[in-house]
């Protein structure tokens, strides 16, 4: 009996110890704010020696007067300036505070920069953190999520802040404000923008007998509506049949706006401007489905299984090694191929220029208008942010022309404000200058809380079409049914 | 015998007073308490929360807006649901069959045919390696194995025979999903069956040999009949596990291409965590709970579970 009592007591002590451990406050990590003076690369002429607070892992502030601003961002390997520009901006502000003898310092913590392409996880983490009231102050991601977060109350309107910084935001291209506006208020400011373009291989066209003049004239033919989607497929097929390239057209393997470009080329609209509801135009949708069925199953210029390819082991190596004549990419890929080795070795801008040309997505009919779309990234401020004014101050600083240009040139994106166009480095960059006029032809995907579902269902259906599991007509019926079941009253189907 | 009878009498004697009953209850609590807590926390509570969620329209706003049966109405009118139900049935039936048969085959090889315990142990340990490997690493290996590029292992073999590379995952996602889950799942059956085979009295097998029984006859007439209860346990266990599992599919194909490997549990995950429609995702998951309970009862009936629980007959 005595032994049983002792055992019981021991069990009680162990249980209480475990409970105490679980309830104890988390150990405070050792403060390791690295304040260092760094030389910023001189590619962008305006940048000079600045004090940058680099916080590779989340660390607490050192002093009571320190203001911790957390940021989260998303992008590819070349897009890291989406968050490092914020760090640099914080460093500049700190220097300014020092000069003004203010006892304030901003500690910019990058809580995450998602480069693995896990969009769903990036959204989930923000929702859960917001609900817990612990979301990072600054979120850098696509503008299309603004309506969803506004409706959920996770981000705050920025109009008052924007008005306080006319020098930073007064010269934003007017068309881009619509991307961050929801129900009459602005919930973000631009971080970058881009244009989706078709890459074509100049060396392969030469092998097909094209002259230099014809090759250089191709982008203009697309703009003039002389070179259509049908011409593009025919040329791709010619290249494959002649054995010049293994495939004719490569497109992205994962969900993205580019899949809807033929829909736009067939004059389909995605959102009713009056009701704000999403739209499925049946005839344009059929055109898009037929286009994808054609390239994969009829002309056989695109691998039917391309959506199972990996970006880094399937798509990019094929593009840089010349396995495909056309690549439905975006301006940022130009920068990516200069920085990331997919088997091509070190390429210079001249190498790229010699091998690749870029053009808009052709119109569906002769004389039609070419297509492109942009997916601007924006800075948003979460409603959990305790210092939104400071967070916005950092954003305004990160919107300085030199930092906008730094990001644009290093990541292959485009500037979104007039002042950036005047920066010498931007003007001197031939590629960026050549594609900036394409912004006139671009369109934005709808701002709607169900946009993510709409695009996902489109993508899944196009997978079925390219694999030959569905004919375009069957796919249209499936698409309508699935969109209706998922989006319901927020969808309008027009014949 | 007298002591045994006294214990049984003590156990069967019912307390009469309230105090005695409470004392009796206090004796049970330390034994049953932890299990009751675990079952309540990890089974009943999630089921209750899932049930409650399934009647709400909870989305990224994370608010409990009651919508009645709307989620279930939507579920039964969703055109993709019949396809997902078919996929789930295919996945569960074939993977479970693969697991049980292959697990039995491995156990038989390493315990009956390989007589030396040390060698059998080595082979069983090798088959347990995938269990010890993190899911992501295990799937990365498979992705390289069936990669559609020239670098894929299978495609390299094809190339050696002058054949073009194949996009295995895009063309045959479900068979590969079954194989991936089957290979890792078979090790569980292997352990259970190995223990069961070892517990068969060796006299029976020796006697059968003396009577001239072949190995096949011994397996059919002695080993398999004596493994009835482990087979029942494994079948029920694997069926329920597979109904609710999706992690390897998520990592390998994410349900694609074109929903070809999308199973019920994965669809619930996609609805809840990709579309952030937590209410609708919960209603899909709730159907899974109901199906799991029904499937368990049917299988227990089929295998004659009552007989397993009957006390051993005296003299048997």
Image (cartoon, coloured by chain):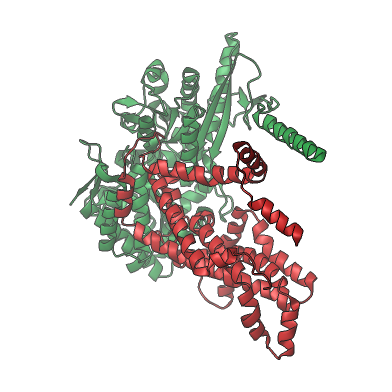
Chain colours: A green, B red
Residue located farthest toward the right when viewing the structure as drawn = A2
Q: Nearer the viewer, residue A131 or A78?
A: A131
Above/below status of A298 relative to A261: below
Residue A93, how many percent across, how many down?
55, 18
Question: Quick check: A153 left or right of A365?
Answer: right
Residue at image x 51%, y 39%? A79
Residue at image x 56%, y 48%? A340
User: To which quarter of the image does residue B124 belong?
Assistant: bottom right
Question: Quick check: A425 left or right of A194?
Answer: right
**Quarter of the image with the N terminus of chain A in it:** top right
Q: Which of B235 and A167 is in front in this view?
A: B235
Residue at image x 37%, y 52%? A216
Residue A296, how many percent across, how many down?
36, 64
The total number of labels drawn is: 0
Residue located farthest toward the left when viewing the structure as drawn = A495
Above/below status of B183 relative to A104: below
Question: Quick check: A311 left or right of A225?
Answer: right
Q: Which of A45 and B120 is in front in this view?
A: B120
């Amino acid at each position: 009996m005595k032994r049983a009592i002792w055992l019981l007591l021991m069990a009680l002590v162990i249980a209480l110890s475990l409970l105490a451990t679980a309830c104890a406050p988390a150990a405070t990590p050792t403060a390791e704010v690295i304040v260092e003076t760094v030389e910023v690369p001189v590619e962008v002429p305006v940048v000079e020696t600045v004090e940058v607070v680099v916080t590779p892992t989340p660390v607490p502030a050192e002093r009571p007067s320190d203001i911790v601003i957390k940021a989260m961002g998303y992008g590819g390997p070349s897009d890291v300036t989406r968050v490092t520009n914020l760090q640099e901006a914080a460093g500049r502000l700190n220097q300014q505070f020092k000069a003004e003898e203010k006892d304030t310092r901003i500690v910019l913590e990058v809580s995450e920069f998602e480069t693995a392409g896990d969009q769903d996880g990036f959204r989930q983490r923000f929702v859960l953190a917001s609900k817990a009231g612990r979301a990072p102050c600054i979120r850098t991601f696509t503008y299309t999520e603004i309506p969803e977060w506004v409706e959920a109350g996770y981000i705050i309107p920025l109009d008052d802040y924007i008005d306080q910084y006319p020098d930073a935001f007064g010269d934003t291209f007017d068309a881009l404000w619509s991307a961050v506006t929801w129900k009459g208020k602005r919930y973000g400011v631009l971080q970058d923008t881009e244009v989706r373009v078709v890459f074509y291989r100049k060396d392969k066209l030469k092998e097909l007998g094209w002259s230099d003049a014809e090759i250089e004239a191709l982008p203009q033919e697309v703009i003039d509506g002389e070179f259509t989607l049908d011409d593009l497929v025919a040329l791709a097929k010619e290249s494959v049949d002649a054995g010049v390239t293994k495939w004719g057209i490569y497109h992205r393997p994962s969900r993205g706006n580019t899949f809807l470009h033929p829909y736009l080329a067939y004059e389909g609209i995605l959102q009713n401007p009056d009701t704000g509801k999403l739209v499925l135009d049946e005839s344009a949708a059929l055109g898009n489905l037929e286009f994808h069925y054609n390239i994969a199953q009829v002309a056989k210029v695109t691998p039917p299984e391309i959506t199972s390819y990996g970006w880094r082991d399937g798509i990019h190596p094929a593009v840089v090694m010349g396995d495909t004549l056309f690549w439905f990419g975006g301006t940022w890929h130009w920068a990516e191929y200069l920085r990331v080795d997919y088997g091509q070795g070190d390429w210079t801008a001249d190498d790229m220029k010699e091998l690749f040309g870029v053009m808009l997505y052709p119109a569906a009919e002769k004389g039609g208008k070419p297509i492109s779309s942009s997916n601007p990234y924006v800075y948003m401020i979460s409603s959990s942010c305790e210092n939104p004014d400071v967070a916005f101050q950092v954003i305004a600083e990160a919107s300085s022309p030199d930092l906008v240009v730094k990001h644009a040139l290093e990541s292959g994106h485009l500037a979104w404000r007039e002042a950036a166009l005047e920066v010498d480095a931007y003007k001197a960059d031939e590629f960026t200058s050549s594609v900036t006029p394409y912004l006139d032809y671009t369109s934005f995907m709808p701002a709607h809380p169900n946009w993510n579902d709409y695009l996902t269902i489109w993508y899944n259906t196009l997978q079925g079409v390219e694999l030959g599991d569905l004919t375009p007509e069957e796919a249209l019926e499936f698409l309508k049914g699935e969109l209706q079941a998922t989006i319901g009253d927020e969808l309008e189907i027009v014949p | 015998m007298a002591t045994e009878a006294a214990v049984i009498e003590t156990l069967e004697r019912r307390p009469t007073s309230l105090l005695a009953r409470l004392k009796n209850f206090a004796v049970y609590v330390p034994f049953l308490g932890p299990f009751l807590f675990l079952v309540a926390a990890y089974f009943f509570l999630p089921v209750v929360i899932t049930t409650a969620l399934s009647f709400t329209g909870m989305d990224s706003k994370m608010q409990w807006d009651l919508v009645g049966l709307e989620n279930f109405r939507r579920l039964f009118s969703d055109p993709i649901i019949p396809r997902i139900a078919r996929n789930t049935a295919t996945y569960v039936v074939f993977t479970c069959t693969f697991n049980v048969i292959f697990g039995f085959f491995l156990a038989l090889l390493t315990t009956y045919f390989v007589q030396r315990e040390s060698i059998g142990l080595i082979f069983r340990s090798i088959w347990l390696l995938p269990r010890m490997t993190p899911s992501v690493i295990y799937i990365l290996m498979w992705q390289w194995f069936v990669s559609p590029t020239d670098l894929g292992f299978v495609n390299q073999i094809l190339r050696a025979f002058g054949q073009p590379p194949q996009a295995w995952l895009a063309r045959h996602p479900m068979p590969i999903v079954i194989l991936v889950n089957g290979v890792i799942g078979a090790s569980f059956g292997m352990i259970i069956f190995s223990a069961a085979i070892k517990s068969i009295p060796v006299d029976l097998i020796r006697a059968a040999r003396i009577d001239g029984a072949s190995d096949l006859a011994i397996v059919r007439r002695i080993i398999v009949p004596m493994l009835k209860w482990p087979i029942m346990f494994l079948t029920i266990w694997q069926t329920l596990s597979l109904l609710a599992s999706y992690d390897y599919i998520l990592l390998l194909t994410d349900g694609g291409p074109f929903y070809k490997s999308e199973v019920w549990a994965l669809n619930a995950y996609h609805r809840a965590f990709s579309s952030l429609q937590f209410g609708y995702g919960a209603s899909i998951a709730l159907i899974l709970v109901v199906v799991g309970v029904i499937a368990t009862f049917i299988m227990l009936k089929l295998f004659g579970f009552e007989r397993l629980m009957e006390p051993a007959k005296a003299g048997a």
